[in-house]
Amino acid sequence: MTTDIAEVSRPARREFLKGVGSAAALALTIGFEWGVSAPRALAATSASGGPGGPAGGTFMPNAFLRIGTDNRVTVIAKHVELGQGAYTGIATIVAEELDADWSQIGVESAPADATRYANLAFGKIQGTGGSSAMSNSWMQLREAGAKARAMLIAAAAQQWNVPATELRAERGTVHHSASGKQTTYGSLVPVAAKLPVPETVALKDPKTFKLVGAKPLPRVDVPPKTNGTAQFTIDVALPGMLVAVMQRPPLFGGTVKSFDASAAKAVPGVVDVVQVPRGVAVVAKSFWAAKKGRDALKIEWDDSRAEKRSSTDIMAEYRRLADKPGLPARVVGDAPKAIAGAARKVSASYEFPYLAHAPMEPLDAVVKLTADSCEIWAGDQFQTVDQGNAARVAGLQPEQVRIHTLYAGGSFGRRANAESDYIVEAVSIAKALGANGTPVKLQWTREDDIHGGRYRPMYFHKLEAGLSADGQLTGWRHVIVGQSILAGTPFEAVMVKNGVDATSVEGAANIAYAIPNIAVELSTTQSAVPVLWWRVVGSSHTAFAVEAFIDEVAHSAGQDPYIFRRNLLAHEPRMQAVLDLAAERAGWSNTPLPPGKGRGIAVAEAFHSFVAQVAEVTVDKDGKVKVDRVVCAVDCGTPINPDIIAAQMEGGIGFGLGAALSSAITLKDGHVEQNNFDGYQVLRIDAMPKVEVHIVPSNEAPTGVGEPGVAPIGPAVANAIFAATGKRVHVLPFAAANVQA
């Protein structure tokens, strides 16, 4: 795997490039609103009207693309670009049906407006997550692009006085073969803008796609990220802006009892020190002054309701709970009876630590608050939720809160939470300063991020299985113990049923293997440690438990782990197909490995995509594990951007490997023991294995790719370690386990 490395722009160059503007263009805005008949397109007088709502005219506000007289096509993205390639994918869908010239495509973020830009997978919420950007946009944006193309062709037909059926569109141009006439989309804007938007339109036959599924298209976010014009929150510098850092309780659940700010206020550059609900904020003219001021703070904390246990204490409680019946998440047949009467029984348990998200850009937000308005600049992942929470704190209505969604330097779920914690902190600080219109940037440090909670929860899994005399899997019982991500949030009413948090059991309750008797149970625990979804959510732990244990069961049955899985997936052709493809490309059956090396396999479904991975490892005499090679097969429906899909699989593998090999948040008497990347170790570049990604061709609707690649890698490596050493791994990360042969 090779990667071209672009030169990183220096700050001075970034500042220069930020000032480079582009001329405003006349625009044709295309959109649609379900149930609204024949709206007319709007010819905008200026692009400055903003996404979906150009200045002047009467067009419907639900806009997804804008075409200028300069032939530029601007796609309005309702999803944030976190590095996952959403902007390019969204643009590809529109450009395909529009028959646009890719070199003329641009993307800008949509405003916060759930009436126009809701994630169709989330209902009435605008947001990005659950690997849903492509799947929920697919038909919506295809129709938007196709309707725009039809209107442009109709405009040309009107100008040339010929039937529209005699015209064709190609690469931003309309052609009339009989006369040899052709014209650009930009030249047709004034006429097309006056035409009615068709209620229905024929979409392309996938066999005719030229961009979707094609060879790598240049990513639309690469030029601004390499020339310095891309704006992340950390880049925002508004006139008169102040910078704030927060001192939060050292124990989760703690609160401020009292504080002495005199030394902090004496630090040059410090403007004020204010108490807000989550702690004490130091506000200064620069980040460094704010940080030095925070270092000088003296705070007395009230820890009476704080979490004071160590990770070992919490895990001990989990083990005890696993021995008691949990709430049923899935029941098929009678698993306890089948296991009790089995000819052979297998059991195992698995331990998973808290995990931080650790995005490369720590949390940050800029807020400009007045008595009647609030503006927010952030790499915002949950616009509707954040808009509502900001309004509540500021004492405003949601429509008085304007969110500018910027590029985000990663998230992995951290920037999307029901409490909008970092947004609420920033608004609270601006409010404490008097809501006087002074912009305030709240900046988290890496240490804040590692200590800040919202972790992937700790979990304990206990599994039992029964085998018949001829090696058939007859019973499966799976007990999961851990905190609920959704408890106490607005999502609880929808995603917690009969006490079972769907995110705690996904990947386990919906186990794909054909087993006649299944019991999946959940015991939900309580703690002041705040938890949150983490990349691939429940499957970040359930896939490991299921795939590591099915390997143990196969070994007990005396069967090849690949064949054992395959036989149990006869009713799941897509899952079976990726398993077969990964095994074939890895040389599973015909390429033996030397001593000290092992090969393991795992397969998982997440967000309606299917991923199988084969890992090859070397384990030295000291038990050090090196992952040498990973072969990945993925079925994600119609592959919109194969190169981005491969990149997301590679990134997911690296992310999952870090969690499997070394990452963990641990508590000692309630205190987080890690501070930065020296303690919380993500995968180092020299540990990244060679990765091969194979994409299954498909005409099914697109499904997620941002997260599913994470799920199988941990168990695939664990199973490879067993193949190399004969030793199973039951505690994550592997660094905490003894894997010597």
Image (tube, rainbow, N blue to C red):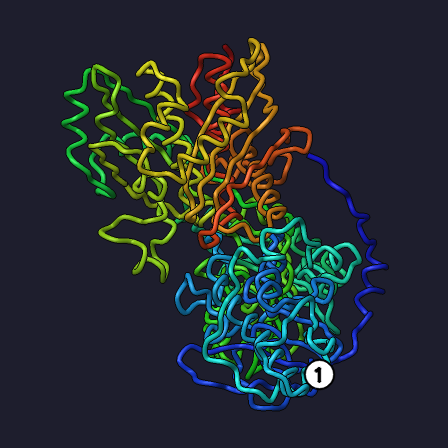
Question: Which residue is depicted at the point 61% across and 23% down?
Answer: 628
| Type of amino acid at the residue the image marks with label 1 | Leu
Decide if residue 553 is on the left or right side of residue 376: left
Q: Nearer the viewer, residue 508 or 98?
A: 98
Q: Is residue 554 visible?
A: yes
Q: Is residue 181 above or below residue 343?
A: below
Count of numbered labels shown in the rendering: 1
Residue under label 1:
26
Q: Nearer the viewer, residue 424 or 161?
A: 161
Spot occupied by residue 178 in the image (x, y as percentages of width and height): 69, 76
Q: Is residue 337 above or below residue 265?
A: above
Quick one: SS at disc 1?
loop
Q: Nearer the viewer, residue 654 or 364?
A: 654
Question: Which residue is depicted at the point 44% across and 39% down?
Answer: 540
- Say which quarter of the image contains residue 89: bottom right
- Say which quarter of the image contains residue 401: bottom right
Q: Is residue 470 above or below residue 542?
A: above
